[in-house]
Amino acid sequence: MPNKILHIAKWEFIEKVKTKAFIISLVMMPMIMTIFGVLPGLLASKSDEKTKMFGIIDRTGQYTALLSANIVGKYTLPNGTPNYSLMAITDPDTAIDHLVKLGTSKILENQIEGLFVIPANIEERGRVEFRSENVGNIRDQERFSKSLSDIITQHKLEKAGLDAAKVKSLLRDIDVKTIKVSDKGEEKESGFLETFFSGYIFIMMLMFLVITSGQMLVRSVVEEKSNRIVEVLISSCSSRELMSGKILGLTMLGFATISFWVLILVGVNFSIDKPFVNFDHLALMLTYFVLGYLFFAAVFVAAGAPLSTEQEAQQITSYVSIVLVFPIALAVPAMQNPGSMIVKVLSLIPFLTPTMMTLRLSIQMPAMWEIVLSLALLALSTAGMMWAASKIFRIGILVTGKKPNLKEIWRWVRTE
């Protein structure tokens, strides 16, 4: 490798590693992942710090006591107190509108969390009305629904002359223990979080690394163009050497960041009783990670070279970043059906290959031909994008003023 490329790479690395932006990005990823992992559980636990009171209007006159005994004894807080308490909404005026009005006033006065209205024909219709200021507490609604459904089922069995207790024991809920198997005959217990986070964390790392490094790369080019420094640099090295040095320097910076993140991840993962990430296909994941990073680095170079202002740089980096965010929205559907044709097709699109294949590796090992084909396409696309980026960079870094259109950029690529 020419010494000029190494000198440029060294300078880029040292200059960027000293900036506040690098320090912030270095600690941002672990903090964000910690927040994503801890905050939902913390919010859930905070919502269950005290017993919740719910109102009941029972038009049948027979389910309030049974429901209270079922749900109060079944769900408890960490300190052992009941998670729920039920208040029967009654009044000498038994008109439903009047009782609903009474219950609604108790909701607005914060005496109860919500109000369940059990109609007289509940056994035929199977529908209960729920009123609350917060109708988004799905878990509480599902728990009440499940308990009431069990009680109604038991009541129907008794009316049919069957032993409800014996039938209930036969219909006991089953806990599912998930075991992930491989073609090597290895088996291990694997839960949803371990499977999900193994691919999700790699996607998040790649996204943050590409976005931060790409923004640095584009801004560096724009700044040097606006200050006319690039003209001095080109006089002492070729445009290809300058571009290669910048990409190499930022790649070194990026992998220094990743090494720091991985050390934290490994330390946390193996310091807890139940690891949330598995490293079964680490080598393949890193291969996709490296190729994906180089591919997007070339994309940022090609997109940033023709730009002349900071505003244009922010716009173009935000557009490229959308492509990286897209697979995050597909994470759960891809996990549910990793072998679908659409997921396979998306995995072969170079812009999506690093993230989609990393996610699939953590869920279900793709066929060998898919892995080979996706790696070949990604490697060829990376080489092609690097070649096109060098063509655009060679001319783009010297162009200032009017932003070139796509036709002009295509002409730069075709220029020998």
Image (cartoon, grey):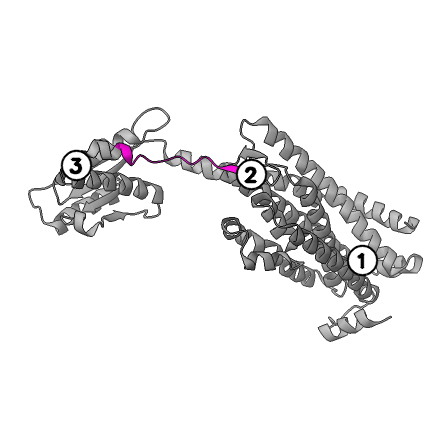
Percent position of residue 357, x then y: 62, 50
As drawn, 283 above or below 369: above
Furthest toward the top, the residue is: 79
Percent position of residue 53, x then y: 26, 36
Q: CA distance from mark 1 to mark 2?
A: 53 Å
Q: CA distance from mark 3 to mark 1?
A: 84 Å
Task: Name the amino acid, label 1.
Answer: Glu
Q: Nearer the viewer, residue 174 or 41?
A: 174
**Is 375 left, or right, of 53 in this rendering?**
right
Percent position of residue 416, x then y: 87, 70
**Is 185 left, or right, of 216 in this rendering?**
left
Q: Nearer the viewer, residue 275 or 134?
A: 275
User: Which mark, residue 303?
Assistant: none
Percent position of residue 217, x then y: 75, 54
Check disc 2 and report the residue beneath it.
181
Neighbour tally class for label 1: few under 14, some 14-19, many 20 plus, Cα within 10 Å: some
Q: Looking at the image, which residue is at 58% across and 54% down?
A: 327
Check disc 1 and report the residue beneath it.
224
Task: Name the amino acid, label 3.
Answer: Leu
Find numbered disc 2 in the image and state the secondary structure of the residue it sits on: strand
Q: Nearer the viewer, residue 102 or 302?
A: 302
Task: Name the amino acid, label 2.
Answer: Val
Is residue 18 rendered magenta in the image?
A: no
Magenta stretch, residue numbers = 169-180
Q: Looking at the image, which residue is at 41% across and 37% down?
A: 44
Q: Quick one: label 1 or label 2, which is nearer the N terminus? A: 2
Q: CA distance from mark 3 to mark 2?
A: 42 Å
Q: Quick one: label 3 or label 1, which is nearer the N terminus? A: 3
Neighbour tally class for label 2: few under 14, some 14-19, many 20 plus, Cα within 10 Å: few
Check disc 3 and report the residue beneath it.
162
Q: Looking at the image, which residue is at 69% across and 47% down?
A: 289
**Is 132 left, or right, of 358 in this rendering?**
left
